């Protein structure tokens, strides 16, 4: 059946870039031009048949349907991996290995004996004058460490839960198994708190070794600064290669001054140097080098010295620059982290549509006698 209705194009030819014949056939198949396919007055309705034909002729639904891009534009949403890895993580062994001791007041004060008057021999019934001992007071000010975060209400409402992979440290990262474990972050604020806590621990590790009041008055002097300030018990190789004799000499210096080093800390490059020394000089199998520190922390190498076995661990906070590398031998019996207040969470003022908080620690590190420790300096 035909009528005089003009549908805008004929069954052949083209309009612009449109293939009219192909487009017409795709929609209406074999129906001739100007066929009335829907007319309720005359009981005509071919639409169901045409619908089936169009479904057969339609090309496959592709991933780009609806437009390419992120969720909200493409029909396929983005599925984000729930695991997040901190690519900036640092190992913090000394935070865990240095004893933490409570401290009252704003300074860590302790007495030391700097000289003894000594004992003497005398003849029978000789005069017995007293000898004088010399005491001194050491005082180290407590310093304040902060890590501040803020989460908007919108982020708190919108962000799903995540898993922080390799986040919670349990050691210095050597030996069997992973030193890091995963921890869950069920919401945005918990994620922010966890990351700020980790940042604070990494700051602690940095200050334990490299803190310097002369560089920043808000820092406390770290173990490296305390040891090197007076070049106490230093073996300076002056840009030369490390030898086993350098290690033995440094340990002997500490021993001669009354110390008994129990922990060696070096940059990763120095640990590598020492591994080569042990393999080359003593024909050790690298598998025979490892032992454990207290609390289940694996050591990289166990050094056999005149004061006994000293575990050596690498630090990510000591330099690997040739000519400036170092290894330290610490008598940890006399090293303490004096803590006025350990890590504490505190909410801050709620002004905008956000939640602001801070984590803080009040502390300082002390070494009651740096002469009980020693170091090798300026290693190539």
Image (tube, grey):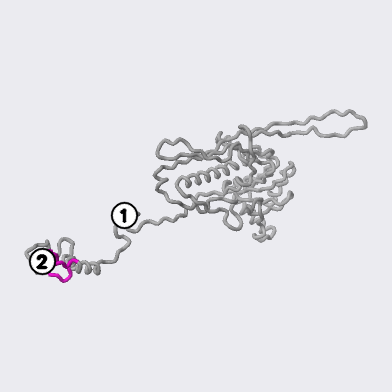
Q: Nearer the viewer, residue 237 or 50?
A: 50
User: Which of the marked residues, 2 or 1, is nearer the chain's N terminus?
Assistant: 2
Instruction: Determine if residue 372 is in view.
Output: yes
Labels 2, 1: front one: 2
- The residue carrying mark 2 is 42
Vertical arrangement, residue 373 with respect to residue 39, above or below: above
Q: Quadrant of residue 8?
A: bottom left
Which image quarter is the N terminus in? bottom left
Answer whether residue 192 is magenta in the image.
no
Relative to 238, 27 lies left or right = left
Q: Residues within 10 Å of mark 1 (few under 14, many from 20)?
A: few
- The residue carrying mark 1 is 73
Residues drawn in magenta: 28-47
Vertical arrangement, residue 33 with respect to residue 291, above or below: below
Q: CA distance from mark 2 to mark 1?
A: 44 Å
Relative to 305, 177 lies left or right = left
Q: Nearer the viewer, residue 144 or 227?
A: 144
State the residue at coordinates (45%, 55%). 82
State the residue at coordinates (17%, 66%). 24
Vertical arrangement, residue 350 with respect to residue 167, above or below: above
Residue 41 at what x, y percent from top left?
A: 10, 64
Instruction: Determine if residue 321 is in view.
Output: no
In terms of secondary structure, where does tag 2 sit?
A: helix
State the residue at coordinates (60%, 43%). 209
Answer whether residue 29 is magenta in the image.
yes
Residue 17's disc number: none
In terms of secondary structure, where does tag 1 sit?
A: loop
Considering every residue shown, the one lying at the far left of the view is: 4
């Amino acid at each position: 059946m035909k009528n005089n209705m003009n549908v805008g194009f004929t069954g052949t030819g083209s309009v612009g870039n449109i293939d009219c014949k192909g487009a017409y056939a795709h929609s209406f198949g074999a129906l001739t031009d100007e066929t009335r396919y829907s007319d309720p007055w005359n009981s005509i309705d071919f639409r169901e048949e045409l619908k089936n034909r169009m479904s057969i002729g339609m090309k496959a639904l592709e991933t780009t349907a609806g437009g390419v891009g992120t969720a909200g534009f493409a029909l396929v949403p983005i599925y984000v991996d729930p695991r997040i890895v901190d690519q900036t993580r640092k190992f913090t062994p000394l935070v865990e290995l240095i004893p933490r001791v409570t401290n009252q007041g704003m300074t860590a004060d302790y007495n030391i004996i700097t000289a003894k008057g000594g004992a003497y021999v005398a003849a029978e019934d000789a005069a017995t004058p007293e000898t004088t001992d010399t005491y001194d007071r050491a005082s180290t000010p407590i310093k304040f460490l902060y890590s501040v975060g803020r989460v908007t209400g919108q982020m708190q409402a919108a962000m799903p839960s995540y898993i922080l992979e390799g986040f919670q440290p349990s050691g210095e990262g050597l030996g069997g198994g992973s030193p890091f474990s995963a921890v869950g972050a069920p919401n945005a604020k918990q994620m922010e708190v966890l990351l700020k806590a980790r940042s604070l621990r990494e700051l602690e590790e940095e200050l334990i070794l490299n803190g310097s009041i002369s560089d920043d008055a808000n820092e406390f002097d770290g173990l490296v600064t305390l040891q090197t300030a007076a070049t106490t018990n230093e073996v300076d190789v002056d840009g030369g290669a490390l030898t086993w004799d350098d290690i033995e000499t440094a340990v002997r210096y500490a021993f001669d001054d009354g110390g008994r080093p129990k922990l060696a800390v070096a940059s990763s490059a120095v640990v590598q140097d020492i591994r080569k020394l042990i393999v080359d000089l003593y024909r050790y199998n690298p598998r025979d080098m490892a032992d454990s520190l207290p609390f289940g922390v694996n050591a990289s190498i166990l050094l056999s010295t005149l004061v006994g076995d000293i575990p050596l661990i690498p630090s990510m906070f000591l330099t690997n620059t040739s000519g400036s590398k170092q290894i330290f031998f610490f008598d940890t019996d006399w090293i303490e982290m004096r803590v006025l207040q350990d890590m504490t969470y505190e909410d801050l003022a709620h002004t905008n549509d956000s939640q602001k908080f801070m984590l803080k620690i009040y502390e300082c590190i002390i070494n009651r006698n740096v002469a009980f420790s020693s170091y090798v300096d300026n290693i190539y």
